[in-house]
Image (cartoon, coloured by chain):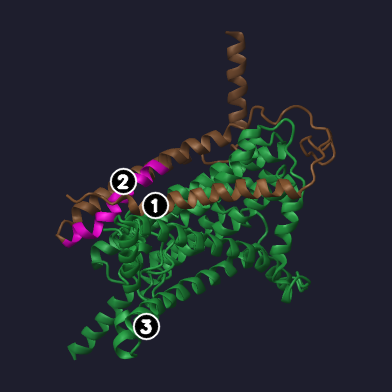
Amino acid sequence: MNETVVTFFSGSHPYQVVTELLTRYLGFNATGLLTVVTFFVACFVIVNVMALVGGLGTYAERKISADMQMRQGPNRVGPFGILQFLADGVKMIMKEDIVPKDSDKMIFFIAPILCMAGVFATLAVLPFSSGFTLTHLNIGVFYLLGVSSVVGVGIFLGGYSSNSKWSMIGGMRGASQIISYEVPVTLSIIAMVLLGGGLNFKDIVGAQGGLPHQWFIFHNPFTVISFIVFFIGALAETNRAPFDLPEAESELVSGYHTEFTGMRFAFFALAEYVEVFVLCGVAVALYLGGYQVPFELSDTFLLHNKIGLPLGPARILGQLLEVGGFVSKTCALYYVVIWIRWTLPRLRVDQLMTLCWKYLTPIALINLVGVAFWVYYFDGESMWNLIFKSGAAAAGGH
Amino acid sequence: MSAYNLNVYMPVVILVAIAIVMVVGALLVGKLLRPHNPTALKEQAYECGEEPVGSAWSNFNVRFYVVSLVFIIFDVEGALMLPVAVVFRKFQGIGNGAVVLGSFLLFIGILVSGIVYCWRKGDLDWVKSFTLNSYNEDRDQIAESKTA
């Protein structure tokens, strides 16, 4: 049985009372109706939070880059300029909507929708916590890989439909870059699936622990390299610097969204920032222990029996602790992504392809063999466990 | 056999619907707020002030096509390896570790031979290597085809 946000809430007492009341007054079994409503509310909340994250992402990018270049950054709108993204949004929506005369109007309209739909669909499996994840699909990782590729289609169609040379080159580069880097990313993820023993994010996160030595990144020497390969690939898939060739402003003006104005451009930008957050979240879930909290502090049993909280608040508090753990790790990675952007210069196209096909893909393949042999010979034990065990055996021998 | 509950895919549908409504809704709301006075110059494709010559939908570099062909092979391999990776530890748990490791290595072997082949053929080089020998060979071939 797959767990969803609904199965988490339906275990609680108020939910069952509401179901009973609705069933009595409406005259039919309200379980299905309440499932739909709960899913809808949960989706709405997560979409709004992620839109906020995207907006704050643009603010963070500008503020951190300003910090690195000893500038002020946005500091006029709201305290410390934190409302800058809202002002930008208002400006975007007031801008004239210019559609090039020679463009393919239909595809021009569809391209931002594809980008947004692809990014939002990935939110369905992003594991914020064990209970608050929208749905723990049993094909979670596979689904995420597939759906996030839709963004690439949106970028390519955006570049193609504009009928502008800059857009065309940007879209072509974006498509080739995204599909190329999908290979090392997929191979790195397969290694983690092998360790976790399932495609479900719950299985993979559940196989890890709250402390760094229980995370998959430090499971064995190969997984450290696997994480680095995955992170570089994720940067390239989201078109972040140093891989921002599709929108290289010094050569392609603005790349695939040169011809997009106002809100259409805003949606491309929002999709990009949310996708960076999603891929950081996936990296956290696969390698950095996901929503696991150190010493299992989020355990309902612990909060209920040892600390004495009532059962309902104990469950909610445990989930919130897990969300906190996940989001703080993800934000730390987000900072690293921005940091890389303002540190490294952009690659050339041939360097980009050489890095992907001649370095990352062979390294990822060797990693996969290494992880498979490690699991086979050491029965999936992490290197720390092996060290502890051999230490204990040596101590016992004397 | 229990019937699989398709309810778990409901968030996917809702999220995609929200994305579509969000884009279309924002464009419709914006229509009430934004100015609309198009001119012929505004509707041209942007080329840094130059007048665009011809359409952008022309023949494009074939290298992108080669990349996508190589990608398809590798991605299908990746999709086929995922199930093997999922059952790896379960097989090992029931004592069939060698079998699953062997099949896993078989898959990886096919992938490695594929990448070695592409590398040798020069399909992974973005800029095709250009040597005097290959130039002379090409020139000789062209000369032969002309005389024939």
Q: Which mark is residue B10?
A: 1
Q: Disc 2 or disc 3, which is closer to the eye? A: 3
Amino acid at circle 1: Met
Q: Position of residue A201 (x, y in %)?
A: 36, 61
| Residue that label 3 marks | A297
Q: Residue furthest top?
A: B148
Q: Are marks 2 and 1 on the same chain?
A: yes
Q: Is residue B106 above or below residue B147?
A: below
Residue type at mark 2 is Phe
- Looking at this view, name the residue that lies furthest to the left: B95
Task: Say which chain is green.
Answer: A
**Residues at discs 2 and 3 both on one chain:** no
Tell which of A366 and A106 is nearer to you: A106
Q: Residue at x 66, y 46 (%)?
A: B28
Query: In what element is the residue under mark 1?
Result: helix
**Horizontal placement of A381 versus A276: left or right?**
left
Residues A80 and B76: in front is: A80
**Residue ID at (72%, 30%):** A102
Q: Quadrant of residue A6?
A: bottom left
Magenta region includes residue B85:
yes
Q: Give the amino acid at mark 3.
A: Leu
Say if A309 sits above or below A3 in the image.
Answer: below
- Which residue is labeled 2 in the image? B107
Side of A186 where A54 appears, left or right:
right
The residue stretch that appears in magenta: B75-93
- In which quadrant will I find the C terminus of chain B? top right
| Marks 1, 3 in one chain | no
Taking A136 as reference, is B58 above or below it? above
- Identify the secondary structure beneath mark 2: helix
Does residue A207 show up? no
Q: Position of residue A116 (x, y in %)?
A: 56, 50
